[in-house]
Image (cartoon, rainbow, N blue to C red):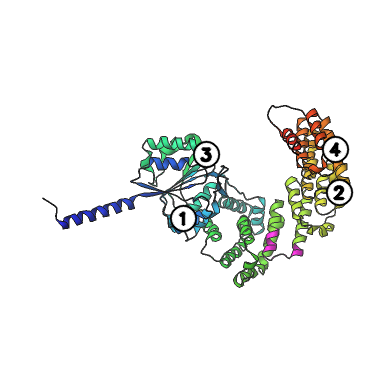
Amino acid sequence: MPLSPKLLILTALLGVAWAHDAEADRKTVCSITVNSPDEQAVFRRSLPPEKFQFVELVEPGRPDWLASACRRQIRCDVLVISGHYDGGNEFFSDRIEGSEFLPVDEMARAACSDSCPGLFSHLKEVYLFGCNTLNPSANRSASAEIERSLVRSGYSQADAERLGRVLAMRHGESSRDRMRLIFTNVPAIYGFSSVAPVGPLAAAILNRHFQADGTDEVGSGRASSRLLAQFRSHAMVVTRGMSDVDPLAAYRQDTCQFADDRLSVAQKLEFVHRLLGREMAETRLFLDSIEEYVASLSERERHSPAIASALDEIASDWEARARYLDFARDADELSIRVRMTRLAHRIGWLSAVELRAELMQTIKQQLARDAVGAGDLELICSLNDSRELDQELHRLQLSPAEVTRTDRAAVLACLGSADGHARVLQALTSADDAEVEIAQIYLYHRPITDVNELRIVSKGIARMSNSPAQIRAIDTLAHHRLWDRQSLDELIRLFSQTRTIGVQTAIAGALIRADYRALAKPELTETLQQNRLKTSPSEDLIDVLIRRLRVP
């Protein structure tokens, strides 16, 4: 018998409702593909379409694709991220044509703010296909000044050591803890504690897992021992997202203060002020975040009433200022002392004159520690790139014996000393490679501009006997983009006389960078061809130079 019209309508409505419920029950697998598409392709190919739908969050050519996904109110149940990972800052691509990347700070902003509630808050699983994404090693450590600061504050040595360990654990910011902080309450976060397999290999392992009924576990929120077993030779691990009762929950709340879009600039500066009022040992461990946030303020923002008032509150906190500067002066590393001093200037605790005096005192303190390495010299020279510290040179009083040391002379030269400059030029032609390195760092910041000095140095380099030091000295000259014919002739003569391929290659590098108008091209080409030392059939830098010289 034919069905009645009412029954037909009811049947149709039930069918629509069933289809709607089936669609609603489908889990959403979101992917962020900034490098290899291999892993997400296996998920898409292996998971049944009646149970899973797929959304690629990256929109090629659109830099704000993550914000776009937030505005579209996409709700993810599973997230697959594929990309090289630099260990703390971003996922990136190694493809020449690939321009997409994923800053970890952007993920933190989305996780900490209410501007993107659906993207991460419903996740059951996260798959991080990148090296060291769940590496437990701390990216930062509390140095000895942390414990000294706690002892000065009244803690016993034993309590200072204990609290120092607690702070080190809380602020270590391992990759694993960073991901746990971003993906809060996610039951299963998969990643790699060291080197991850490349995309095609990871895809092959995934495919093998899914073919063995591994698809049943996707989106369940339960850690899969079978998946870990498949990747057992590739350091895959699994962890859980941070919860409200996690030992690091308070630290997450603090770090979210910098990332939360719901807070105004003035409110974030008030939080900075509160941090500056804590134990300086803990304030020091927030240095990166405070420094980055204060540096992000534009001049226009600084002059708005609410922000100016918040900055004035910080600048007038003399108790915090005194504790902060005491800690900065006692810091172990020169770079930390400099960074903390500069930050003190930016937040109004030091005037420009006081900043220069503090920096000079810091440099003097470093010299007294008898520890001026290559990194320290690089930092000191960069501090005076604007030449503002030249007027403060008188604050450094060194003995005649100290001035003869190349590292001391280089510090003085970076601060405007003519005698120091002359001593460093001598060091450039030294047989000691360590001394040549010091001269190289100095001359990167203060290139030779006097043609007579350039000629003297070129002759001295041509007479050097230590090949590694000679190669470094030639590389130093190469950055000067030589224009003086006499200096170039010294290098060309050396090319003809040396029996070291490394020296010839370094000279070729200097000549490539030189002013071609100062070169006699036909004669030089002939010299290169007749005297070159060939050790490999493949093209080298000398071949490149010869080819360029032949261009009219």
Q: Is residue 366 visible?
A: yes
> How would you classify the magenta stretch by its main secondary structure?
helix
Residue 274 or 29: which is nearer the viewer? 29
Q: Amino acid at mark 4?
A: Asp
Labelled pair 2, 1 in contact (Cβ < 8 Å): no
Q: CA distance from mark 2 to mark 4?
A: 17 Å
The answer to which of marks 3 and 4 sits earlier in the sequence is 3
Mark sitting on residue 450? 2
The answer to which of marks 3 and 2 sits earlier in the sequence is 3
Residue 550 in magenta?
no
Q: Position of residue 206 (x, y in %)?
A: 43, 38
Task: Choose mark 2 or mark 4, whichever is in front.
Answer: 4
Q: CA distance from mark 2 to mark 1?
A: 58 Å
Residue where numbered disc 3 is placed? 196
Does residue 64 appear to the left or right of 375 in the view shown? left
Residue where numbered disc 4 is placed? 489
Q: Amino acid at mark 2?
A: Asp
